Every structure is written in C-alpha cells, then in structure tokens.
Image: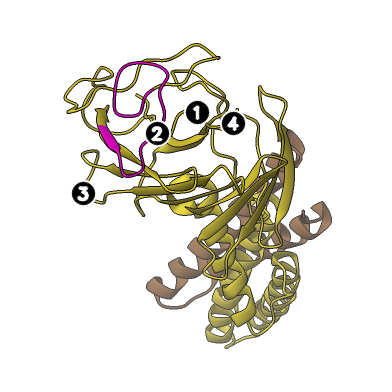
Amino acid sequence: MTIENTQLFTIAVICFVSLVINFRVQTKPLWKWIGVGLSALGLLIAVAVMILQHVAPK
Amino acid sequence: MSFRSLKLAPGLAVMAALSILVASCGGGGSVPANAGSSNARPASCPLDETPQLGGTGCGGGPTPGESFRFTEGNYISSATTGANDSANGSATLVSTDASAGTFSGNLNTETGVTTATINMPSVSSQAMQLQYYNGNYIGDGTTPLPSGGSITVSSSGAVATQTDANGNVWTITGAMQSDNRTVTLTYSSAIGTFTANVDSAAWAPAQYAAAQDAARRAAAQGLRLHPDVTATQVAAVATCIAAGAGLVAAVAFVIPGGQGVAGVAGIVAGVFGVVAAGAGAWATFAPQSPAPAPTAAPK
C-alpha cells in the first residue's frame, strides 16, 4: 500500500501555503509558531516520503 | 545436553522407549551418563540381545514391577515393567528452572499402542524432541522420532509424514486445541500410535508469540468501528480538510480584519497537513501485518 505522489505533492503545497500564511498572519506568537511548526512538519514529512518513495520504492 | 529415558522390558518383539531430549536447557552442565544414578543405565546390547532392565547386562526376561532409575543431565527418568508386556515410564525435569516439566509414557507391545504425555514448563525456551527406540536395542543414538523435519500445525490441524530409520512411516497429525496453546500431536504408524500434548509456549515460543500477537491484532481489528479504513483513506480525508482550511486561511488573510480567522484556519491546515503526510508515510512504509504463524516441529 502506497500513497500517490500527486497526493503527496498536494499535501506539500497545502502545507507550504499554510506555512506562509501562518508565518505572515498577525496573531499571538504562540499560535503563530504552532501553526508554522505544524505546517513545516507536514511539509517535511510529505517531501521526505516523496524522496524515500523515489529512492527506495516499496 | 540430552536426555534419554525409558529403558523398556527386554525380550519384546517391539521394544520401544520414549524419551524427551531437551536441548539448550538452562542452568547446569551436562552430567555424564550414569553419573549420580542409583542404578546404572543398562549397557547397549547387540541387536539380537536385549538389555536387562535395571541392570547392566544383556539378555534375560522382564519381571513385572521391576524398575530402575537413572540420572542423566538435568533429568531423572525411570521405567517400570508392567503386566501384559507393558512398561510405564516417567521423567521429571528436576533442575533447569523452577517450573518443572513432566513426562509420562506407556507402552503395550501386545496392542502396539504407546502413549506419551508431555507437560513442559509454561515459560521455557527449551527445544524438545521425542525419541523412539525400536527393536531389541536400547542405547545411545537409536532412532529418534521424529528425526528432524518439520510439521506445520494450525488451528485447523495439519498432517505430515515421516519415515524413521527402521522404515516405519509415521503419520503426524497436529491440532491446536481450543485453548490456543496446547498442541496435540498424534503419531501413527503400523507399529503403533501415540499422542503428545505439547505446550506450544514452550515447544515453539516464537511461533506461539506470533500466533498470540496475530490473535490480539484480529481482536483489535474486530473492535474497530470501521476496520476497513486504511491509512491511504485517512490521508485523503486529511488532505481535503487541510486544503479547505488552507483555502479559508488564504482568503481570510487577504481580507482586512481576517487575520484571526486566517490564523486559526492556518493552524487547522497545518494539523491536517501533518495528519495527511503522516498517514501517507504510514501507508507507504509501515510494516505489513504478518499472517498468523504456524507452529513448528520439535527438533
């Protein structure tokens, strides 16, 4: 069972957009950085899975 | 380290002994044969002669009620001649660990039926082997049964055949009992039948653990509300939610006064983005659930 690269790419784009918005949004720093952190984590995971799928397809 | 038991009545057309050969048992070194015994193990006799029970010579006839006992390795075994060409034997695991294993066996050469019941310690890594001595010869290294090979035992039972060194073809049927722990092995051949109830936790601990693990997984699967939900589906749903939240965040971000909404929606998008990416990673790289493992044969 694998996940499609297109879906991973979609997730990565969403996380990236979310990351930018969270970074630019004027809100309390705690929530801002929580949002930034989560978005960055999601982006990181999505990109990592894409890379690993390419390097070591299962 | 090995164990041999049941030196049976001499002068029988079919003389058999059952023994448990326990390898890799913990604690203590191997005691040389005959060491520490009150009655020495009978010497191995030529094929045309029989060992004298309780003695060291060959030939002679059995006397009902006569018994002998010897210590070998970490075990004490004994055999007693009975009426009607029968012999009873027993063995007790005496010093490997706190939970002793026991063995009892019976042979009636008139009916050709031999039975053996083995109770191994519930927690043990000891390998076990039944050993069968046939013909008028008792001694080291005679025909082991089964002599290696393997048998697959599942809840639905399994059948294997094995030919011993004397040409006897044994049909081995294994069946997991309802307690999901006890495996009953039935050995049948033209010269007799015996059954052995084996605690699979001791007999095949790895397979037993795998079977229990599979049973737990199956039970957990049955308790799920939607057991057919896969990680891929979770990723798809989370992606949609994250996309929606991201869209809301983007729109709110460009609308004056929408910073608060954009912040909340951005966090929601981030959370579900992580869920989607994590589910995708799990779907791709998580180990597949192994099928319930069969138990293995005694070696």
Q: CA distance from mark 2 to mark 4?
A: 13 Å
Residue position for label 3? B98
Residue position for label 1? B11
Chain that bears disc 2 = B
Which chain does the yellow colour mark? B
Quadrant hosting residue B257 = bottom right
Question: Does dot 4 land on a helix, a strand or a loop?
Answer: loop
Q: Nearer the viewer, mark 3 or mark 2?
A: 2
The amino acid beneath tag 2 is Pro
Tell me whether circle 2 and circle 4 mark residues in contact (CB < 8 Å): no
Whether residue A41 is visible: no
Q: CA distance from mark 3 to mark 2?
A: 36 Å
Decide if residue B40 is on the left or right side of residue A30.
left
Magenta region's main secondary structure?
loop
Residue position for label 2? B62
The magenta-colored residue range is B52-69
